[in-house]
Image (tube, rainbow, N blue to C red):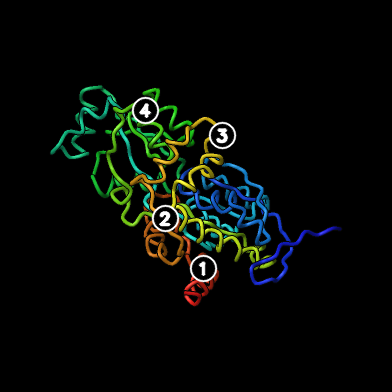
Amino acid sequence: MAMAFAFHASGAAAETVTARVGVIPVIGAAPLFVAEKEGWLHESGLDLQIKVFESGPNIVQAAASGGIDIYIGGVAPAAAGRAKGIDLRVVAALAVDENVLVGGPKLKAFFKKGVAPAAAFKAFRAANGRPARIATQPPGSVPAANLQYWLREATHTDPSDVEIVSIGIDATQQALLANAVEAATVREPTLTIVQKANPEITLIAGGSELFPGQPGTVAAVSKDFLEKHPQQTRALVDGLVRAVEELQKNPDRAAPHVEAALSKGIVDGATIRKSLSSPAVHFVVDPKSIIESTKALLAYQVKLGVADKAPSVDGLFDSSFFDKTTSEKSSKK
């Protein structure tokens, strides 16, 4: 059997390995698209077969059957999967504070200055004879937990004043624009897309308001892939570190790569470029930076009844690859 080889800057040859990647199509996944489109991963011996999923739990299910090597999605489903024997290791954080809550024109009228969110929802129900419908992703996902935290803990909204609609990302966007729901948790580029389509759609709560220190999209690698291909796992992290720097320092160069991966010609480049600078996303890489907020999120999932007990984060985060990358970068300065 023929093998393909890639050469690192150090001159060492590495077998090129193909990895099956499950990804949620959001701006938080941008570092992966930039690293892949720039060719940095291929140069280091890693080729990707990318498949798009509607939610993190769906990717975890695919990983359970051995169909996914690299997971690009919310950290909570990855942690929950480990509790069921699906061993994923978070080797990099990608973004935080991604999920925000937006309201359509019907709800916007009730969110007046000085009016508490709980009072606004109550007023909507009184005026319309029904609760306000809020779309979010399925239970167990990060968006669903963030929304519930904001409603229950932050704003103390009466549960009877809202109706949670659990649907996928694309369906959420469509429902919001069609006024089939009054509000929705969204991530970029959906936030920029819906506000461009309807300027009456307004931001109700930002990422840190929905959940303090809100952990978001991560890059996790299956235990089997990590142990068989540590060099390619390192290549993934190296590429993600480089990509985040590119997104932060030169977003105009990075934007076309993200556009090609996410829009498929449907969303124009200007919209993608704007979403990269959105307050709804902050790119990070160090997996250690989200450990405490992840613990808090998982503990809250228990309160929601999504899990009997919070999955342990022991073994979930593997920062060794990131630490090596940053250590080598520092020594070269």
Q: Nearer the viewer, residue 10 or 287?
A: 10
Q: Amino acid at mark 4?
A: Val
Q: Residue at x 41, y 50 (%)?
A: 305
Q: Kindly report the distance in space between the C-alpha atoms of the residues bearing marks 3 and 1.
A: 31 Å
* Residue identifier under label 1: 322
Q: Earlier in the sequence, mark 3 or mark 2?
A: 2
**Place of residue 325 in the rendered image (x, y in percent of width and height, measured from the top left):** 53, 70
Q: Amino acid at mark 1?
A: Phe
**Place of residue 332 in the rendered image (x, y in percent of width and height, measured from the top left):** 50, 75
Q: Kindly report the distance in space between the C-alpha atoms of the residues bearing marks 3 and 2.
A: 25 Å
Residue at the outermost right position? 1
Q: Residue at x 42, y 27 (%)?
A: 175
Q: Earlier in the sequence, mark 4 or mark 3?
A: 4
Q: Nearer the viewer, residue 204 or 305?
A: 204
* Residue identifier under label 3: 264
Q: Earlier in the sequence, mark 2 or mark 4?
A: 4
The disc label shown at residue 181, or none: 4
